[in-house]
Image (cartoon, rainbow, N blue to C red):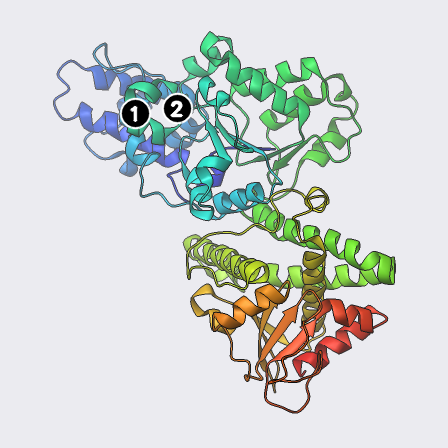
Amino acid sequence: MLWLGSGISRDRVPNVDALLERVVEHLRSNTVNGDTDGEYQAALTEVLQLAGLRREELEGIDFSIAVGEWPLRDRIIPSLVTNYSRVLDVLVGDGNPDDYLVWTGLDVPNTYGSPDLEPDVEHYCIAILMLEGLVASAVTANWDGLLEKALDELTPAFGSLVRVAVKPDDFRIVGPHMEVIKFHGCAVRARDDESEYRDLLVARESQISQWTEQPENRSMRKHLEMLYTDRLTLMLGLSAQDANLHTVFAGAIQDLAWPWPASPPTVVLSEEHLESYHRNLLKITYGSNHQGNAGAIAQSALLGAYGKPTLLALVLSSLTEKLSFLIGDEIGSIWGSAAVMQLRTDLLGLRDLAARHADPDSPEVLEHLEIIGFQREFTARLIDVANLALSIFRTGRMPVPGSGRYEPLSDRPAAQAALNADFPSKQFGRLGVALALIGRGLTSGQWSAVPGDSRAGGDGVVRLVTSERNARVFFVKDSNALTQLELQGSFDDSDEDVLIVIADEEPPAQTRSPRSRFGRDGRASAGRFSVASSIADTASADDLYEAFQLAGGF
């Protein structure tokens, strides 16, 4: 399961530094604009005292100029970041509500609840992992609705597949097999229904310290404790410094402690280095097993990368692992483990070559926003080509161009999906074989590859390019999908630059267009490669690769 924090949204909503500067500026601007009762001045003074300013420093601040121009700005704001919950708990007179600095100072409805916010790479990757059945629960302290928006964009069945739990009553919703748990509230719901959800937004120190003991939070707390007890945890963008989280983790471990050594680790933190609150989390998690093993536990928990590269890697790795498993199911009993290992290695080569395109070639000369934009474009292309490939493979139909939908390879881990009689595990295993053959050609320099685009469906799922060939490749699972692809006019059967890869045996050719089962006969026609027939007619992965080269005219 995933525990998510503000780090996964840092490139879509303002970071804590910017938000706290906004709060201080809100107080300052009201102080110099008719604060006759001194409420804003008193609150501003209290906030600045949390930054540890000396009296003479505080008295030397010129409140007539904006916070961003204060000489002490770079000292004040970072100091307030470590005290953010105490800052937001400062009261602004008796006439304003206790959460005034949260709701009005941060401008929650338009900052976190804005309908104009767009999901980022992290949100789309998490959504893919959930749709692939690899993450059942995502627990988040974030107020924004970016993960839910990503899921809604990727699948039309969002409402029936995903349970979003903000209040205890939400856990009574049955049916969905995925859940997003927002234990600190939801700004989107608070924007739409302030009376019902505003009080559920948790950020102030008084709320955090009391959260676990309040009766209305008992159901949420027990649910989180159960998840932390029962499942391995990956934490992304979550500092885990809030006291209520530590109480939840401690309560969970009281019921069932995690052992050490543990493989895989119980908790993995997507961080580049560990802070003191991370080490405290590990101490709580492993209990008495932590003493004497602190160094090894810390090493096992530190991933060494932040959320964006971690999640992109997980998506690519997970899809590859699913296909690798299905390759083993299909090939293992025919050619044995050595051939399976060879094909899996070739598939990994394809994965790694794709991963190289997730970052620009020279990131050191680019601005941060340029790098982020490049990664967003990569993610969008990945989603598009995966949906294109899997839609055509299953049905022979082109997806809606540029729809942004995502068709999962399977809605559960491959070992479970293969047990479903309706899941085409053999055909998907053969798709994995075909992709492995393409991977071998790429890593050996036989050809280069250009991924397809749903807005140009006639260009194929992928183009394999050599000095002499520019083959547009389509993958279909059986004759029905092939017929649909032909009826849709997605390719011209007389176009020799088209290669159709069929997972099952190809049906006998029509009399009007005779040709051999695979390969080329001198006529100008689309190439055909039946994976099942070719496996039956060859004796090794090397022979199969030669058959694929022949069929494609390479």
On the image, the x and y values in percent for residue 477 come to: 64, 62
Question: From this viewpoint, which residue is outermost toward the bottom?
Answer: 522
Q: Which residue is mark 2?
A: 51
Residue picked out by circle 1 = 193
At 65% from the left and 51% from the top, the residue drawn is: 317
Q: Nearer the viewer, residue 355 or 526?
A: 526
Q: Amino acid at mark 1?
A: Asp
Q: CA distance from mark 1 to mark 2?
A: 35 Å
Disc with the residue nearer the chain's start (1 vs 2): 2
Q: Residues within 10 Å of mark 1 (few under 14, many from 20)?
A: few
User: Where 447 falls versus 40 (above or below)?
Assistant: below
At label 2, which amino acid type do we have? Ala
Q: Residues within 10 Å of mark 2 (few under 14, many from 20)?
A: some
Question: Height in image: 417 above or below 33?
Answer: below
Q: Secondary structure at mark 1?
A: loop
- Give x and y (percent) for residue 213: 50, 8
* Residue 448 x %, y %: 61, 74
